[in-house]
Image: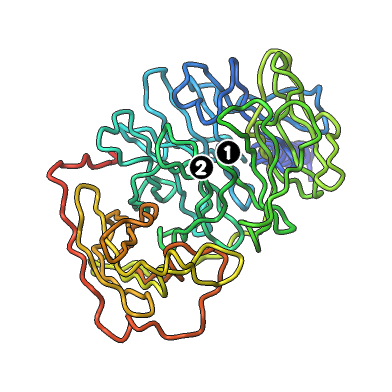
Amino acid sequence: MNGKNAILIVLIILSIGYSGILFSSCREKSMEGIVICTQVSGKIQPHDLYRSKTSARIIAFDPNKPDGRLKVLTEDYYSACSPEVSWDGKSLVFTAKQKQNDSWQIYEMNLGNYRTRKVTSSHENCIDPAHLPNGHLVFSILSDKDTLKTGKPLFTCSTDGSDLRQITYNPVIYCASSVINDGRILSSENTSATDQQKNMLMVMRPDGTKAELFYQGPEGTMILSRAIETKDGKIVFIESLAGIQEGAGITSISYNRPLHSKVNLTSGIKGDFQSVFPLNSGKLMVSYRATDSDKYALYEYDPDTKVLGKSIYTNGEFNLTEAVMVGKHDRPKKLPSEVDKGVKTGLLLCQDINVLDSKFSVKSPILQKATAIEIMGKDSSLGIFQVENDGSFYLKVSADEPFQIRTLDEKGDVFKTCNWIYLRPNERRGCIGCHEDAEMVPENSLPLAVKKAPAIISVHKSKLNEKAIELE
């Protein structure tokens, strides 16, 4: 081998080596353990960033280097918030508007290379995205001109915006959705923008079926954040009383008994909290401020000792909230869907309208007088039906149309009206009664109503043409 060939071989080897180094440097980097949060320049109000003129941005930092460099993930947007990391830790979805007068839309970011794509392109506000176990997203759509009082329904779609499906149809507001380990969607529900007496958590399957009450706090309670499940089967969220944010604390409920297991984890701490996120260590990452004049900062919180721990990150100029940590976690279960668009109705069975809301399955002397039900549509009554001798009824109702049920006595006087209900196409639902404790188990008996064909409820369509929500 002469000298020229030897030099050429060395140069080729060096070139390959440098190419390898360059290639490896361009590979997607892992963000495992990185904290992502929303940084707000002005005052924070619960669920108000969407209507506020205050701008926000999403930042990332290494919690092990609190004095290290911050990375702004949404530099090209007027405002951005609601970050949510996928179960595999590889992507981030968030809500943002590119210009001040734009509507809010959903975006997805690859956390390996920070490339972003727009998921939704609607004239309406698409907000509060969360990852579903099948790779799709669930989010709320909020109209600025909701004259028909259709609320804020939930939709699902793929991460490229296709396969858009509406999954809720009752005229209420759904927001701050998350997905718990059993595969169901947990969403904060409010009956109207001004009614804060019935702020509650509702749970449903990803197709919108089996929607039911999961948690409701005392009168005046406001749920101010996403409700997220911890590894030990608790659901944690921020809650305040009397419609005010001051004094908001962390509420914990048990997955097994959500209606009867409420614990205020921060009752002994002055100040208020803005968001909460469970860490793998069992501790919580919280957004907290001690006084109204302080900015919200990020801290560790120990739910066992109820002690506010070390500071994770503070910034005297900005409020920090909606913090999440990048990392893999168990994918929730994939639940099968019973929705069949070829079927235009759903079935509803009630075991006994006279069951009382109590710790025990007992009869109420007053409610025993209820002998009939009235089905109420959005515009008018859809009919009065006598129940069976055991208090049961069986209905076939038009799918994806909201309705309410009122219990009546022999004189036709109304005892109580339930919240808005809807049934998805081909959905079959059952309930114990119209006034029962939601955690009750039904009696092992065959309701008389199922021995007959279901009563058919004809929905009276509104004369108003409801505005369809379309994505471009």
Badge 1: few (under 14), some or many (20 or more) residues near its Cα, within 10 Å? Answer: many
Taking the view exactly as shown, the residue that stands out farthest to the left is 463
Residue under label 1, please give it. Answer: 221
Against 179, residue 352 (above or below) is: below
Which disc, if any, is residue 199? 2
Q: Earlier in the sequence, mark 2 or mark 1?
A: 2
Residue 191 located left or right of residue 230: left
State the residue at coordinates (58%, 31%): 242
Colour theme: rainbow
Dividing the picture into quadrants, the one containing residue 371 is: bottom left
Tell me, yes or no, if residue 5 can be seen here: no
Q: Secondary structure at mark 2?
A: loop
Q: Amino acid at mark 1?
A: Thr
Marks 2/1 in contact by CB < 8 Å: the verdict is yes
265 or 86: nearer the viewer: 265
Against 390, residue 266 (above or below) is: above
